[in-house]
Every structure is written in structure tokens, then in C-alpha cells.
Image (tube, rainbow, N blue to C red):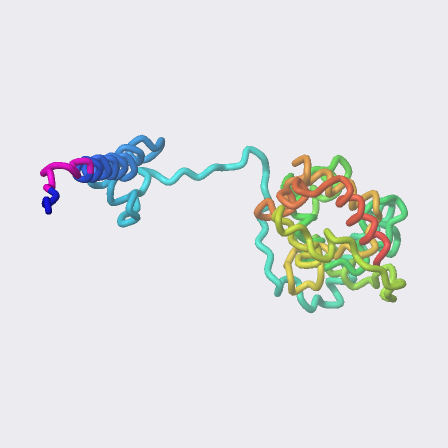
Amino acid sequence: MMQEQITPGGDGWVPVSIGITAAVAVVAIIAGFAWLPLRQPGEEFRGVWDAICSAAGLVQVSPRAAQVVQADYPTTRIEVTPQMLHNPSAQSIGRGATLALRCTMCHGARGLSQADTPNLAGQFPIAIYKELMDFKSGARTSAVMGPLVSDLSDADMRDLAAYYAYLPRESEAQPAASAPPQIVANGAPLRGIAPCGSCHGALELKAGAAWLGGQPNDYLHAQLKAFSSGTRRNDIGEQMRNVARAMTAEEIDAASRFYADHP
């Protein structure tokens, strides 16, 4: 019986393939941990080892100087907290009632508008105070409101907020039950839209956010469109602009109608 003879080097492709694989791995490591980090715009490294460590997550490269981007338009400067304007005095409410005489043409004698302007009766005082401050500073623009608030002091604006918050809302009775639209009840999580009520519900949920129930439909619709286009930009942290930009025209219509119909 003849014994099969094994030829040396018959499996020579094995070391070749191992060598090729190792070479590819080395090139990938160099590219991923050295070449690519060094090519990143805006990154500054002290050397190749610094780039490798940064790519591996071992060090954090700090920029030479922090770049703070400033808006080229007036922004909200007021800081709101849930504790603001609690328990106003009777004197403050009385002074606010006197100051409010100049507001009746647009906002009504009892804070209830007949001109598609906001209903102020029963509005959260922080929301009123913030908007007055924004009109005065130019963070929110209005050809009507700008001149009217120009001579108001901080105490005047607090008194006005206290007076209007003291007035009863249009209707405390709940209307016939109807399911809120999807955008109001659940938002649109895949587009980063939270439910409207998560901010515009009870006061403790979002300080400075307005009560929307019973506001005129045309006013609500106009403000959502203004946030969407960026012509209104006094929202803190740009949250309303981000939400409104992601809303469809149908969602804006549905949200405006729902709040207008539900005081």
C-alpha cells in the first residue's frame, strides 16, 4: 500500500490570507483612530497619540475658546419660576384694574376679547407678566402693544398680571365631552412634538406657558403660524418654534379649533 505524501507548502494560502487580513486590520485601525480624527474640521490635537486617544474616547479635546452664538435679535431676558406672582395683594389688583382701562378696547372691559385678541381674564399671571416684559424689551414685536407698554414699570406689569389673573375666565363649566385631536392629546413623538397639554395645562407643569382654553381661534392659529415662520421668537429655548415648525397645517388648524372651543 502506497503512503500518501504530503507536499510541504500545499496550504500556503493560509498564511497569505492571514497576512492580508492583518494588513487590512492595521490600515483600518490607523485610518479610524489616527487619520480620520486628524482630518476632522475644528479639532486640534497635540499629536497622533492624542488623536488616537480621543477617537478611543479616552480624552476630551477642549477647544481653544468657547464659542457662544448670540442671536441677532432681542431675546427673552426674564427668568420665570412657578413661585412668581403668588398671592398678590388687594392693592396690587386694584392698581392693575386702573391700569387695565387702557387695554379695554382690544381685550374687553372684563378681559374677554371681542376682537380676536387674547382673552386675559383668568390667564396665568406669570404668562401675562412675561409677555408684557417681552413686548417692552422688543423680544416680542407688535405695532400696537409696543407703544402701550413702553412707559410701564415692572410694578405696573405685575399689577396688570395680578388683576387679569384675578378675573374669572370665560367659562369654568366644561363643554360637552369631545376627544382632543391627536396633536393635543399625544403630540407626535416621531417628530419631536410633545402633547400641547404637557406645557399648556396646569400652572405647575410649565411656568410661563399660557392657558389656551377659550382663546380666539384666529389668534391661536396666527401665533402658531408666527412661531412656525420665526416671526414670533420670544419662546424660551425656542421650544415653540421647534414644535410649530414640525406641525402640519392640518394639525395647526385642529389644535387652534380645539382650544378655542374648550374654555
Q: Which residue occupies the extreme front position in the image? A: 1
Whether 9 is among the magenta residues is yes
**Residue 82 falls in which quadrant of the image?**
bottom right
**Residue 54 falls in which quadrant of the image?**
top left
Q: Nearer the viewer, residue 129 or 174?
A: 174
Q: Residue 115: x and y, percent? A: 88, 44
Residue 95, above or below 72: below
Left or right relative to 232: residue 45? left
Residue at 62%, 43% (x, y): give it: 242
Left or right relative to 64: residue 108? right
Whether 183 is among the magenta residues is no
Q: Which residues are magenta?
A: 5-13
Examine the rendering and report whether any part of residue 140 can be seen: no
Residue at 68%, 55% (x, y): give it: 195
Q: Nearer the viewer, residue 203 or 23?
A: 23
**Residue 206 falls in which quadrant of the image?**
bottom right
Q: Nearer the viewer, residue 57 or 231?
A: 57
Residue 185, above or below 139: below
Q: Residue 205: x and y, percent? A: 64, 62
Viewport quadrant of the C terminus: bottom right
